Image: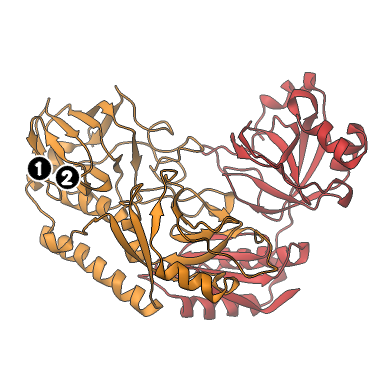
């Protein structure tokens, strides 16, 4: 397969990284999964350009990314609407399109959501580190030299010309999530739910929480009513494994939704966001409001099945 | 106290915790290790990740392939099946440490806190063979225990925003080594040239849960003997 230079970073914006569906199997060595926060959007973008859904793409945070095509490519942009432009014209999201050599794609500012995912037909050619192309920023490995993208970086793709004929495929609007600034996130009771008194559990489910600016790929920090633990319990617990979506409550009672850059933790978990809603967490931005709804395991399963049905339908349509 | 049978806790629709006891204790931790090894030997369908910790094993799974009830049943069966041949001997890693000065900026403070000399702190720290209870916090970070009671020290009131790679530190009844530069709230006693995490090397860390660590003091002039060789 011919690997060719496909994209040049003209401007990276505040944070653009290479991510795939994450790094699993190394948690016992303290290695967190990393990976696209909104795995749903990355999977759809990949499928639209004829890639494996697990291929790496660019995770673009909020705004400012500008890339130049170094050859003819098919690309798709999914996830948060960051007002993309191809040269000077608005560029459709959730649809694969051809960009010609020399074209520039620019993401101006968020209209809805927080992160967009750019997939390139032919993928991002990088050697996997610990079985994944995802960037681990804190420990500086994986992705593009273990760091976020910078001006002048060149990305390569494998035989992008073979993907051009797929251009024009779209993901049906009914499958696209809506990203309003008021979120209702579904969750199951967490592993230490019993350590919180009824009043804290009620406050957790009945109160809106505001998203702090101190949020990143490690976690979404929320502020709202303090969620106290039961009296006579220590501040922390014996450290244990944690998953993305675990909602931990440190000593100050302000919950944090853990994301993909953490593998162990020593605080109590009030609840865990269900798999179907994990991709939405990527689209929550500082200043948004979040409420939680408790669901059952059966409801979580149904919700996930519904989401997967949209992906399966897309795969069927793409043949 | 052991939990027999183990306690299963739901962590969302894609993970569960198997708790084998209620505290930090070598025999409970060894039970966790046994279960980990059994699951390595007999992988269960749909399981993506196993994360052992002090007293529990986290099992992360693909919810489209398996579920809590099915996994609980299979894990209980494995847990009850005794197979001592599974438990391989732990390794012992000797870790050289330059104590004090710029290499261990908290050594004096810790000595003052316990009203002993820095030399006594070092003697206590190297006088125990530690168990790797778990690896977590950052890639390759070993949680080692237990520190002698005489060295038990509360965490720093204000965590440092930057702890250099290789720092050897203590907090409460634990000691650890920072494999990558990160923030940290433990007291830094010294520094080791041994590399504890390398994503491009297999395995990425020389230690596994259940292994042993023995520290020994070196002079800063000797550091070069370890920096060129692989850990």
Q: Nearer the viewer, residue B5 or A112?
A: A112
Q: Which residue is mark 1?
A: A97
Q: Chain of mark 2?
A: A
Seen in the picture, residue B213 relative to A296 is either above or below; the reply is above
Q: Chain of mark 1?
A: A
Q: Residue at x 68, y 60 (%)?
A: B54
Seen in the picture, residue A145 relative to A96 is either above or below; the reply is above
Q: Which chain is orange?
A: A
Q: Is residue A4 visible?
A: no
Q: Where the C terminus of chain B falls, by quadrant?
A: top right
Q: Which chain is red?
A: B
Q: Where the N terminus of chain B falls, by quadrant?
A: bottom right
Seen in the picture, residue A164 relative to A199 is either above or below; the reply is above
The answer to which of marks 1 and 2 sits earlier in the sequence is 2
Q: Residues within 10 Å of mark 2 (few under 14, many from 20)?
A: many
Q: Dot 1: what SS?
A: strand
Across and down, in percent, residue A72 comes to 11, 32
Q: Residue at x 47, y 36 (%)?
A: A141
Tell me: B77 left or right of A156.
right
Q: Nearer the viewer, residue A113 or B38?
A: A113
Q: Which residue is mark 2?
A: A76
Across and down, in percent, residue B101 comes to 79, 24
Q: Residue at x 36, y 64 (%)?
A: A291
Q: CA distance from mark 1 to mark 2?
A: 6 Å
Q: Dot 2: what SS?
A: strand
Both marks 1 and 2 on one chain: yes
Q: Are marks 1 and 2 in contact (CB under 8 Å)?
A: yes
């Amino acid at each position: 397969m011919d690997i060719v230079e496909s994209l040049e970073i003209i401007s990276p914006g505040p944070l653009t990284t290479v991510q795939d569906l994450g790094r699993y199997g190394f948690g016992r060595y303290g290695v967190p999964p990393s990976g696209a926060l909104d795995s749903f959007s990355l999977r759809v973008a990949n499928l639209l350009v004829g890639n494996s859904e697990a291929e790496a793409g660019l995770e673009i945070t909020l705004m400012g990314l500008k890339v130049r095509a170094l050859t003819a490519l098919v690309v798709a942009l999914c996830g948060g609407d960051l007002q993309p432009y191809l040269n000077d014209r608005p560029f459709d999201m959730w649809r694969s399109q051809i960009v010609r050599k020399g074209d520039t794609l620019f993401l101006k500012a968020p209209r809805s959501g927080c992160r967009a995912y750019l997939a390139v037909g032919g993928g991002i050619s990088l050697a996997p580190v610990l079985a994944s192309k995802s960037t681990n920023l804190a420990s500086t490995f994986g992705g593009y030299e273990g760091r976020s993208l910078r001006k002048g970086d060149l990305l390569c793709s494998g035989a992008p010309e073979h993907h051009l004929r797929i251009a024009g495929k779209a993901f049906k609007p009914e499958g696209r999530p809506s990203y309003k600034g008021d979120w209702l996130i579904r969750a199951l009771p967490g592993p230490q739910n019993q350590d919180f008194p009824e009043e804290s559990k009620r406050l957790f489910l009945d109160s809106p929480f505001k998203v702090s600016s101190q949020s990143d790929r490690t976690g979404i920090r929320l502020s709202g009513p303090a969620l106290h633990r039961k009296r006579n319990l220590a501040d922390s617990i014996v450290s244990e494994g944690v998953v993305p979506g675990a909602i931990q409550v440190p000593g100050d009672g302000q919950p944090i939704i853990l994301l993909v850059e953490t593998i162990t933790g020593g605080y109590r978990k009030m609840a865990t966001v269900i798999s179907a809603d994990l991709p939405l967490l990527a689209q929550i931005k500082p200043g948004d409001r979040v409420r939680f709804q408790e669901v059952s395991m059966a409801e979580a399963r149904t919700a996930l099945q519904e989401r997967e049905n949209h992906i399966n339908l897309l795969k069927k349509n793409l043949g | 106290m052991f939990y027999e049978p183990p306690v299963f806790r739901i962590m969302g629709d894609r993970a569960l915790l198997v708790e084998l006891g209620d505290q930090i204790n070598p025999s409970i931790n060894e039970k966790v290790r046994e279960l980990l090894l059994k699951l390595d030997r007999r992988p269960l369908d749909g399981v993506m990740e196993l994360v052992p910790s002090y007293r529990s094993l986290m099992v992360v799974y693909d919810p489209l392939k398996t579920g809590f009830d099915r996994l609980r049943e299979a894990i209980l069966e494995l847990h009850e099946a005794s197979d001592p041949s599974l438990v391989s001997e732990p390794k012992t890693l000797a870790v050289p440490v330059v104590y004090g000065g710029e290499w261990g900026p908290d050594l004096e403070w810790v000595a003052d806190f316990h009203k002993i000399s820095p030399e006594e702190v070092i003697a206590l720290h190297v006088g125990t063979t530690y168990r790797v209870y778990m690896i977590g916090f950052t890639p390759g970070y070993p949680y080692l225990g237990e520190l002698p009671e005489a060295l038990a020290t509360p965490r720093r009131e204000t965590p440092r925003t930057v702890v250099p790679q290789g720092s050897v530190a203590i907090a409460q009844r634990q000691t650890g080594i920072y494999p990558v530069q990160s923030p940290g709230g433990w007291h830094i006693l010294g520094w080791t040239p041994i590399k504890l995490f390398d994503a491009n090397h297999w395995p990425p860390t020389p230690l596994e849960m259940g292994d042993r660590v023995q520290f020994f003091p070196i002079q800063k002039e000797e550091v070069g003997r370890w920096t060129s060789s692989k850990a």
